[in-house]
Amino acid sequence: MEGIKDKVAIVGMGCTKFGENWNMSAGDMIIDAVSEAYEDAGISSKDVQAAWIGSFWTNLPAPSMPLATILKMKYKPITRIENMCATASDAFRNAAYAVASGVIDVALVLGVEKLKDSGNSGLPTDDLAMGNVGTAPGTFRARNFTAPGHFAMLATSYFNKYGLSAEEGRTMLAKIMVKNHHNGTMSPKAHFRKEITVEQVLKAPVIAWPLGLLDCCGVSDGCAAAVLVRKDMAKNFRPDPVYIKAMQIAVGPCEGYMNPKHDWTSVKETYRAGQAAYEEAGIKNPRKEISMAEVHDCFSITEAAIYEDLQFSARGGCKEDVDAGTFELTGELPVNMDGGLKCFGHPIGATGLRMVYEVYKQIQGKAGPRQVKNAELGLTHNLGGTPGGCTVSVIIVGP
Amino acid sequence: MSEYQKPLPIIEFQAQKEFWDGCKKHQLLIQKCRDCGEINRRSVRMLCPNCLSGNLEFIQASGKGKIYSFSTIMAYPPQGFQDDVPYVVAIIDLEEGTRFRSNIVDCDIDALKCDMDVEVVWEDITDEYALPKFRPLKQGS
């Protein structure tokens, strides 16, 4: 198996401001993000040979068709992708494989979601959400479990396994959220741009014990886009293209809900996707070789488990590394440099490409006050589902 | 009990009906394959997930197990569950070597711990359905 390493380049990217974009339709956001990506790559729709659009809930009837009109891509091949919260990452993956195959020279990929129009303060209704997963035919229904509740069980297990009191565990998690909010203050496109304190996190209303309000990411609208081309064409577009080094997805069989051997201090899909991506990119020591990472901090505990599953931290070593500032912007391995889902919110179909946007800008040295030193290999981790069974994408890009 | 407002089970094939009929009789049933002997750890199936045999039987679980993990939902429950807040969701490891997602009821929420012994308790929700829930096992029982 040859793998994707150094076959496909990103030559343009765009991203809208994430937030409560009441004044914008999904189409408006698509135009904004794609226009930025086109300008960045120096192209227009007429140069694009095929497009992939990722969207989960957005009410786009026949979602591929608006692209043909909005982006003036009449009669071109357009594909809509859905893979839960890893939707944008999977759209990126499909577009990259098309380019790697040699069939498509220039591909457009975008992810878009308008969550704020759903009529709910959280995610759209449980019936809609769980109709896709928890209540699908042939599954045990768990109708009063919530998304925070599922991830909270990861925290309960983690605290139990490593002997952390609720206060010790919650403080460890709070520090991760304080870090992400600090980074978010430097992200003009983030939804939330305020510093928070550990005390504020600990005293916030509890949503699903042991997780409080500030352990949870926000709900936002947003769109991000990328232009992909073959490696040998990349320098025709820009002097500093960013190359795909690895691109893996692991989809779990939901064993966490069934098999007593399944340990809920870890998300197996993250570990597997990470291992496969490291192998594809030829990475032996992720903590040393990865310069920075954008990871799926839908909840504080998710980021803690990711550190260990991606082998940035030893098992049970999260607290020590968090206390040492390892993952801060100035630390050994900066994580969520732009503020993560915590500050951008999580427009489901857009998040994965927002992550790639940040590492792309970092590698080009264009991240402004958030710029990390020696930004070379950047990793994105995008998780769809719950710790008991999910889809995880790990993408590694570099110069 | 006709005013029950929360979601009801969806029955699509015979084995699912047998499972819920067991619940109505306050029997927690799990499937076992007569051919390969595996306990079906997944939801009720027509075929054995291990060997694809259709020769499955239901066995009655003891209803005893341990809390593997849990969370107390304090806000934003799904539609229909607003009046239940706060309530406990949990993963229970059953004695028979499989897991079950349910609620912990009749408990002191602040005293709940992982590995705590629990037993099934039944909530009769309609004339046709009872839901298996779990409560901490009383000392000495």
Image (cartoon, rainbow, N blue to C red):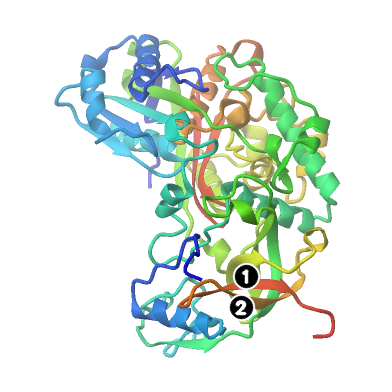
* Residue A399 showing in the rendered view: no
Decide if residue A330 is on the left or right side of residue A239. right
Q: Mark 1 points at which residue?
A: A260
Q: Which of A49 and A196 is in front in this view?
A: A196
At which x and y percent is residue A323?
82, 35
Q: What element carries label 1?
A: loop
Tell me which residue sits at (56%, 64%) in the image. A257
Chain letter behind tag 1: A
**Are discs 1 and 2 located on one and the same chain?**
no
Q: Do the residues labelled 1 and 2 touch (CB within 8 Å)?
A: yes
Q: Name the residue under label 2.
A: B97
Q: Is mark 2 on a helix, strand or loop?
A: loop
The amino acid type of the residue labelled 2 equals Gly
Chain letter behind tag 2: B
Residue extending farthest bottom: B34
Tell me which residue sits at (61%, 10%) in the image. A368
Decide if residue A209 is on the left or right side of residue A224. right
Q: Which of A33 and A230 is in front in this view?
A: A33
At which x and y percent is residue A24?
40, 18
